[in-house]
Image (spheres, grey):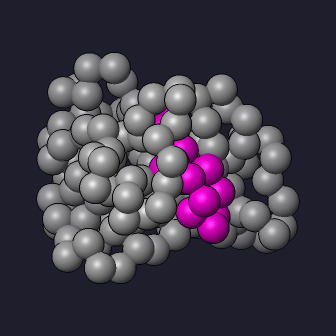
Amino acid sequence: MEGTQITAVREMTDDEYDRLYWPVDNMGRARVIELSDGSKLLPSTDPEGNGPGYFMGLPRDTDEIIGATIEQLVPNTDISGTNRHRPAPPEIKLSNGESITPLADPEGNGPGALFQIDADGEKMYQIHVETKQV
């Protein structure tokens, strides 16, 4: 994922919600980040993919990040509610200096999770970065 460019940011479609068996959230539709390799990033409420989450740090004018490259995924130790059984989703560092983090919901009620769907839409992977013990 690192080194790929953001080509689009949009709301999830009804078809995407149906394929994932996710309810449409009353706080708004989840956003999808489309990448230059054809894959998509989605925020989820939890690592089991039980529902749509929220991207914190995603600008309202998403044109600001279109074309930005994902430079690094870093462990996010600032999110409360994480434990050894549920690693925090990574913070996504972009080439334009922005950072995006998946949360469980827009109110920040949990760390959420980050999923990537391959270009064919066939495989879905949870993305996380382990913190290194010193």
- Which quadrant is home to the N terminus? bottom left
Q: Give the farthest residue toward the top.
A: 60
Residue at 17% over, 65% down = 38
Q: Residue 89 versus residue 115: which sits nearer the camera?
A: 115
Please say if 36 is above or below 64: below
What is the number of callouts on the image? 0
Residue 59 is a magenta residue: no
Image spot of residue 104 (x, y percent): 63, 43
Residue at 18% over, 37% down = 66
Q: Residue 75 versus residue 55: which sits nearer the camera?
A: 55
Q: Which range is magenta?
A: 43-56
Residue 44 is a magenta residue: yes
Residue at 36% over, 65% down = 19
Image spot of residue 92 (x, y percent): 45, 48
Q: Residue 30 versus residue 75: which sits nearer the camera?
A: 30
Q: Give the farthest residue toward the bottom.
A: 122
Quarter holding residue 86 = bottom right
Q: Main secondary structure of the magenta part?
A: loop
Quarter holding residue 63 = top left
Image spot of residue 131 (x, y percent): 70, 65
Image spot of residue 132 (x, y percent): 71, 69
Q: Is residue 76 visible?
A: no
Please say if 47 is above or below 74: below
Residue at 83% over, 67% down = 84
- Which quadrant is home to the C terminus? bottom right
